[in-house]
Image (cartoon, rainbow, N blue to C red):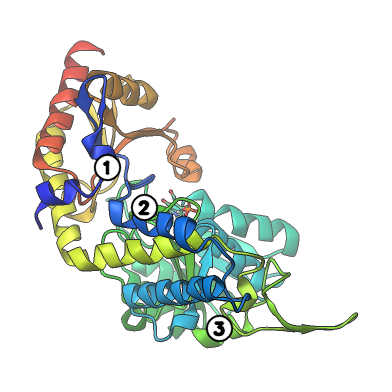
């Protein structure tokens, strides 16, 4: 993987702020966008800025063809069996909400989640516990912050209808043992959903191999446009799933009293769509497939290993998550003793245009349970260099030296 060359694909990396290039280490929040994605989206606005799936004229047809093409690219991206299993939505959050509201869950049904869920895979279930009386139960991790499969096994039972877990955590970059979790859920008659917001940008996803039932993707974290997400579901499950937002484009026919919904994906994609976003999502998936997800994963982990080596032995640094960098993918999350994480982020930005995330990372339940106010999180991606990792590490050490 030629990172120097890849960097040229990203217009914002060519820009300077206060005379310096940026060191972007906030890709777990949102990735940067390559020119090929931006150009594809502009092409829609310049050349065929019309409605897909309805109008039969030439421009409308071009939108429909482009949407179908994007759906097929996403199908290939996660190795889904058929393109109809790909639902385009606003984000991963909407995908989880769709499943939460579309499954026929009832009073007393149990849903199991991990102890490091993003709010997007916790709040929808907690809300259902209030509205419908479902029980949301948290599977505690091992003391070394790895997933406890024995604990999951001990919590399973006939009343568990869904195991819904983060695939790769945005808290610390740790990836849960997906295949084991999915198989265990199925062995006990439950469905399995993975929140792939952080995994899909960084590793090969194969939904047929893993046998996951539902999988959500955050397109804006994988070089695609903001305001785009994908829900994957096995076709027969999508067929049974109730739509959440309904209206135009979701129906085959309507009378004054009856509705006949279209089959998936149409019944879930209500109203005119974010066509540029969908086309951009396809371009982003293609961009990453062309580079190779296995190469990206190895590159990210190399950089994280470098950062971990330089920082993790410092006694002022408290690392979040497993000690081993190989277990934390692209994320180095930490605190400096006695410092607020927002101060660390602001000083790094001020010193060297180093951009990281700070605060509770939308994983409030974990921070509250661990009585922490937040963390500073650096996350690397395909466009980061060893130099980025070194400068980041040096500046963190400088903060410990000069600002504490
Ligand atoms: C693990 C995880 N799940 C879900 C989300 C929400 O993704 P989206 O913004 O696409 O809804 C995020 C975003 O940070 C995330 O990191």
Viewer-nearest of labels 2 and 3?
2
Image position of 235 with respect to 176: above or below? below
Q: Quadrant of the C terminus?
A: top left
Dividing the picture into quadrants, the one containing residue 267 is bottom right
Identify the residue position indicated by label 1 in the image: 11
Residue 38: image tag: 2
Residue 237: image tag: 3
- Which of these two is toward me, 274 or 173? 274
89 sits left or right of 68 in the view: right
Task: Provide the secondary structure element on which disc 3 rests.
Answer: helix
Q: Earlier in the sequence, mark 2 or mark 3?
A: 2
Image position of 209 with respect to 332: above or below? below
Residue under the image location 66 percent in, 67 percent down: 101
Q: Is residue 166 visible?
A: no
Task: Provide the secondary structure element on which disc 1 rests.
Answer: helix
Residue 147 picture location, percent across and down: 33, 60
Dividing the picture into quadrants, the one containing residue 179 is bottom left
Viewer-nearest of labels 3 and 1?
1
Q: Residues within 10 Å of mark 1 (few under 14, many from 20)?
A: few
Is mark 2 in CB contact (under 8 Å) with mark 1? Answer: yes
Q: Residues within 10 Å of mark 3 (few under 14, many from 20)?
A: some
Q: Residues within 10 Å of mark 2 (few under 14, many from 20)?
A: many
Is mark 2 in CB contact (under 8 Å) with mark 3? Answer: no
């Amino acid at each position: 993987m030629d990172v120097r060359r890849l960097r040229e694909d990203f217009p914002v990396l060519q820009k300077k702020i206060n005379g310096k290039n940026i060191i972007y280490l906030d890709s777990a929040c949102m990735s940067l966008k390559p020119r090929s994605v931006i150009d594809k989206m502009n092409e829609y606005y310049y050349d065929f800025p019309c409605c897909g799936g309805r109008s039969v004229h030439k421009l409308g047809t071009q939108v429909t063809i482009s949407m179908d093409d994007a759906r097929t690219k996403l199908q290939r991206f996660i190795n889904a069996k058929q393109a109809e299993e790909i639902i385009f939505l606003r984000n991963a959050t909407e995908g989880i909400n769709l499943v939460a509201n579309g499954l026929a869950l009832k009073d007393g049904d149990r849903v199991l989640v991990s102890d490091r869920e993003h709010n997007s895979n916790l709040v929808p279930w907690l809300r259902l516990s209030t509205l419908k009386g479902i029980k949301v139960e948290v599977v505690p991790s091992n003391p070394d912050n790895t997933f406890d499969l024995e604990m999951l096994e001990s919590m399973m039972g006939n009343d568990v209808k869904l195991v819904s877990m983060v695939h790769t955590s945005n808290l610390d970059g740790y990836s849960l043992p997906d295949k084991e979790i999915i198989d265990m859920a199925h062995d006990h008659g439950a469905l399995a959903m993975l929140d792939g917001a952080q995994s899909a940008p960084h590793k090969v996803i194969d939904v047929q191999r893993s046998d996951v039932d539902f999988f959500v993707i955050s397109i804006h974290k994988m070089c695609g446009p903001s305001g785009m997400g994908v829900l994957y579901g096995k076709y027969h499950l999508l067929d049974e799933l109730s739509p959440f937002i309904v209206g135009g484009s979701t129906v085959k026919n309507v009378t004054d009293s009856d509705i006949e919904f279209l089959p998936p994906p149409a019944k879930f994609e209500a109203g005119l769509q974010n066509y540029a976003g969908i086309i951009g999502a396809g371009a982003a998936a293609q961009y990453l497939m062309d580079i190779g997800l296995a190469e990206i994963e190895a590159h990210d982990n190399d950089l994280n290993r470098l950062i971990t080596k330089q920082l993790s032995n410092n006694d002022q640094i408290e690392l979040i998550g497993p000690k081993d960098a190989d277990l934390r993918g692209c994320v180095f999350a930490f605190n400096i003793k006695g410092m607020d994480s927002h101060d660390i982020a602001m000083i790094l930005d001020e010193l060297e245009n180093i951009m990281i995330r700070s605060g509770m990372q939308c994983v409030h339940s974990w921070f509250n349970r661990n009585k922490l106010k937040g963390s500073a999180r650096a996350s690397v991606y395909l466009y980061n260099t060893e130099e980025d990792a070194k400068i980041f590490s040096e500046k963190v050490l400088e903060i410990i030296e000069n600002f504490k």
